Amino acid sequence: MNVARRHLIQIAALAMLPIARAGATAIATPTPASAPRVAFLSPGEAADALAHGDGYYAGMGLQEIRARVGSALPGLSLAEARVAARDFDVGALLPFNDDARAALRGMAERLQPLLLSRAPLYARTGWSFIQLDDRAEGGMPHTRGPHIVLPKAAVDAWTKKHLDAVRARGLAEATFGRSLLLHEQTHVLERLHPDRFEPLITQVFGFTRLPAPPENAWLSTHRCTNPDGPDVVWAFNLTRLGGSGWILPTWYCPTARRRACPRISSRWPSSWCAAPTGTGSSSMPPACPGGVRSTRCLVTPPGSRSRTRTSTPTRSPPWRCRTGSCATCRTWTSGR
């Protein structure tokens, strides 16, 4: 997911939830009743969750599936390729050993006092973990339904830090991994409580929900499904920042140049598209959902020799971002 949006959601979501009463200085100490609920799915349980828990694979395109499985999948139809993507992920599932369980459970337990004091909804929500081999999903942490899916590299790194802290008798002060866990748990809460996050996205962030995602031939072929945010129907009106037109974040799969298929990567860019100046209205982009010809990309698609220029916001958005990465539109380019 886009780095700017993920940090903002994490911070703003914590802020919008009920907080401790004014003047409280002590953080609540966990009791057996308030201790976090932590679950570790076995490969069998996780296989069922990935295959039947949501419609994740049903929206995938052929190019992104090839990138995910690392194969051109010759002769497979789109429906067959989607099954292959699911089976690839199922084949990458791993169990948690005792040390990994202790490390993750300890991370959740050390977070619990802070959550009880400042974000009760987080404190009441259980943690559910799935582990994947690093070859799946580009080795990136993500979420599926109510589950946080962790790559083996992250689990191994946290397990090592846990064991090192135990040997150094510094486990109580350890803070490793908690920012990432909070970020991923925020995605879980987005799904569980959409009514809480809708005002955050529309009133705080200033995004507008579209009736359907704008489409054009290039985006339809190259769009990549983000497990943390598959709903690509949010657009932002640049007039709020002194610019013109609209932008819409879409994670896309670049065209492979030196191999039969691209490899999924956290460095794949986010494409921010905009409607031309003077079209549509102040409350809704003009390309929703059918007027594809009035939508253009701010970022040059791979292989293109020219850039489409559009109005640039006169000031940076009011959230943390990496501006200036695109000479044309000061867009943000990152993975999830």
Image: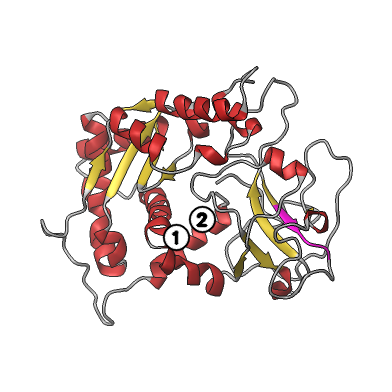
- 276 in relation to 133, above or below: below
Q: Name the foreground residue: 289 vs 234.
A: 289
x and y percent of residue 291 in the render?
78, 58
Q: CA distance from mark 1 to mark 2?
A: 6 Å
Name the secondary structure under disc 1.
helix
Q: In the image, what residue type sits under mark 1?
A: Gln
x and y percent of residue 65 in the render?
59, 30
Identified at 45% across, 25% down, the residue is 87
Is residue 126 shown in magenta?
A: no
**Bounds of the magenta span?**
272-276
Dividing the picture into quarters, in which one does residue 96 lie?
Answer: top left
Residue 134 appears anywhere in the view: no
- Direction from residue 205 to residue 179 in the image, left or right: left
**Residue that label 2 marks:** 6
Looking at the image, how many numbered discs can be counted on the residues?
A: 2
Q: Are marks 1 and 2 in contact (CB under 8 Å)?
A: yes
Q: Name the foreground residue: 61 vs 96.
A: 61
- Direction from residue 171 to residue 77 in the image, left or right: right
x and y percent of residue 280 in the render?
78, 70
Give the residue at the far bottom of this rendering: 22
Give the residue at the far top of this rendering: 74
Residue 301 appears anywhere in the view: yes
Give the numbered dot on residue 10: 1
Identified at 61% across, 58% down, the residue is 233
Is residue 275 shown in magenta?
A: yes
- 158 in relation to 318, above or below: above
Identified at 25% across, 60% down, the residue is 124
x and y percent of residue 25 in the render?
24, 75
Name the secondary structure under disc 2.
helix
Dividing the picture into quarters, in which one does residue 283 lie?
Answer: bottom right
Q: In the image, what residue type sits under mark 2?
A: Arg
